[in-house]
Image: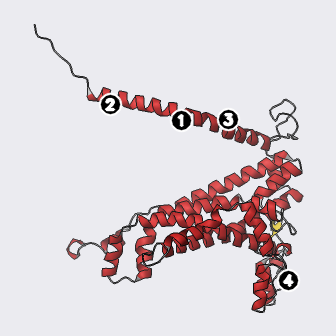
Amino acid sequence: MTTRVTAPRAGSRGSGIRRGEAAAGWIFTAPVIVILGIFLLVPVLMALWVSFSDWTGRGSPLSGDVGFVGLENYAAVTSGGGLAERDFGIAMRNNAWYVLLVVPLQTVLSLFLAVLVSRAILRGRGFFRTAFYFPSMTSSVAITVLWLFLFSTTGVVNQVLSWVGVSGPNWFSDPRGIVHIALGGIGVQTAPDFLTTGSFLGISAWDWMAGPSVAMSAFILMAVFTTSGTFMLLFVAALQNVGSELGEAGMMDGANGWQRFRLITLPQLRPTLFTVLTLGLIGCWQVFDQIYTGTQGGPAKTTLTPAYLSYDSAFIGQDWGEGAAIAFILFLIIIVFTVLQRWVLRERPVSKRRAAQYQPKGARR
């Protein structure tokens, strides 16, 4: 009698192992998922409900006394025509100029510092990396207090400016926009009529063009100073993974240093560049602690930001619905800009015309 021995199929065994690994993975990650769900997802969903309700901050927002008001809180800050809309417009203008200046400056500076400290001929590279990164390790509250001292009327910055014959402003008490100051320097003192007739979020085009105030400019300098070190380390790590073979090939083809960096090194830094721009964008739209510690929106609301306005509306003004609505509008703005950034920095296929330049002459048609 012959006994047939059937070997187990490799596919079923492999799928069983994969199922076991998946189950083990879920078991190990379950505590973190539960914690994030309780302390992150549930509060976010409750805040979303508050933005659509008339909750007064007393009792539970899920109680029967809380009514659904739809988009009234969102309409109040975007098209209500009152003080809430104007404050939101001022906050958006301030933060838009903040993002427009901080994100490019900190990205360019951090990349420059990364290239500088990655050069083999530089002595003491470890010291310079630590020195450039040190401001990022310091508490933002401590840096803000230091900045208030440095940029005070009799502070160090104005003392240094006086050495070159420049009378420094009263930085954190000057609400004038730097663009308006520059236009005033060339004789433009009043706005043209077409820039003052219409408005967006309660702010005229002339006010949108004011630029960051002198006070907000000080915060912009502080942001660039404190964040460039962190992003420098990201670029340093990325530069270490860039192969030297392509650079040597470019050198053999006669490319100078700038051409090798622009055409060879920079394209290989695309993923890191996207990360730096995204983190910078998120951080700039969420700026809060510097404003809370420094000026609390003053002078004349020229340092007011949406994040601080959300706090002020909810915790100070006790208008929790508008505060939550501002927070979720800010969330949507960040998502839109992140997706747009992703699209701009996407990998693009090489065009046929450009690919033909690298083909042998006999292969071209």
Dot placed on the residue nearer the N-terminal end, 2 or 1: 2
- Whether the residues at callouts 2 and 1 have beta carbons within 8 Å, the answer is no
Front label number (2 vs 1) = 1
The secondary structure type at the circle numbered 4 is loop
Front label number (4 vs 3) = 3
Answer left or right for 240 relative to 205: left
Q: Position of residue 34 (x, y in %)?
A: 61, 33
Mark 4 vs mark 1, CA separation in Å: 61 Å
Disc 4 residue type?
Answer: Thr
Answer left or right for 232 relative to 312: left
| Circle 2 crowding by C-alpha within 10 Å: few under 14, some 14–19, many from 20 | few
Dot placed on the residue nearer the N-terminal end, 1 or 3: 1
Mark 2 vs mark 1, CA separation in Å: 22 Å
The circle drawn on residue 29 is 1
Q: Position of residue 255 (x, y in %)?
A: 37, 82
The circle drawn on residue 38 is 3
Looking at the image, which residue sits at the far top?
A: 1
Quadrant housing the N terminus: top left
- Residue ID for mark 2: 14
Q: Where is residue 134 in the image (x, y as percent from the top left)?
A: 62, 66
Dot placed on the residue nearer the N-terminal end, 4 or 2: 2
Mark 2 vs mark 3, CA separation in Å: 35 Å
The secondary structure type at the circle numbered 2 is helix
Disc 2 residue type?
Answer: Gly
> Which image quarter: residue 302?
bottom right
Dot placed on the residue nearer the N-terminal end, 4 or 3: 3
> Which image quarter: residue 252?
bottom left
| Circle 1 crowding by C-alpha within 10 Å: few under 14, some 14–19, many from 20 | few
Compared to residue 292, the image places residue 186 above or below, namely: below
- Whether the residues at callouts 4 and 3 have beta carbons within 8 Å, the answer is no
- Residue ID for mark 4: 190
